[in-house]
Amino acid sequence: MKFAGCWFDSRFLPCTSDHTSKDTFLIGLVGPCGSGKTTLTTLLSSAGFQVRHIAQEHSFVPSMWKKLTNPDFLVFLDASFQETKSRRQLDWNEDEYLEQHRRLEHARSHADLYIWTDPLSAEEVLDIILAHIQPLLPSAPK
């Protein structure tokens, strides 16, 4: 079933989705440690979205993100090595950071949205994600 439009934040927007509500639209978040996955999972969940923080950066299986979750919309959150260390006080070195990026290559190449989070607040990242998924959301229930 296709919808002619979507309700989002009291606005009606064009939409072509087979989902019945934002509750069934699954957002997946991937990225290196300290890129903002946990924070954005909390913010998106609080807004009523189904969201999964996918720990792909720890897996040796390139497509594990898809096998575990298979999200409708995959967001790759990225951050510099220095920023990840300052956000989470991570005790790791740049080689470990680069290894996480290597493990994330498959997910990054399949991401629907890539966000460099260094200069952004969590709310700004949330706004970017919401702007990109608005057209994919179905009509609001009457």
Image (tube, rainbow, N blue to C red):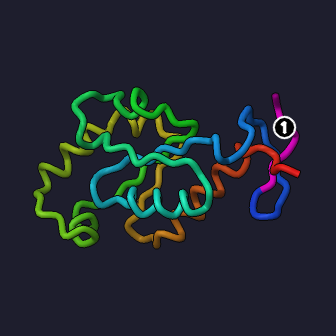
Mark 1, Cα crowd under 10 Å, few <14 / some 14-19 / many 20+, is: some
- For mark 1, give the secondary structure: loop
3 within the magenta span: yes
- Residue 123 horizontal/vertical position (percent): 53, 71
Nearest the viewer among 66 and 102 is 66
Q: Is residue 133 left or right of residue 96?
A: right
- Residue 135 horizontal/vertical position (percent): 73, 47
Q: Is residue 106 left or right of residue 43?
A: left
Q: Which residue is mark 1?
A: 3
Q: Quadrant of residue 99?
A: top left
Q: Vertical placement of 103 versus 35: above or below?
A: above
Q: Which residues are magenta?
A: 1-7
The residue at the point 72 percent across, 44 percent down is 21
The residue at the point 41 percent across, 53 percent down is 77
The residue at the point 27 percent across, 44 percent down is 101
Q: Is residue 110 left or right of residue 2?
A: left
**Number of on-image labels:** 1
112 within the magenta span: no
Q: Vertical placement of 109 versus 124: above or below?
A: above
- Residue 61 horizontal/vertical position (percent): 27, 27
Q: Quadrant of residue 3?
A: top right
Which quadrant of the rendered structure holds the N terminus? top right
Mark 1 residue type = Phe
- Residue 120 horizontal/vertical position (percent): 45, 70
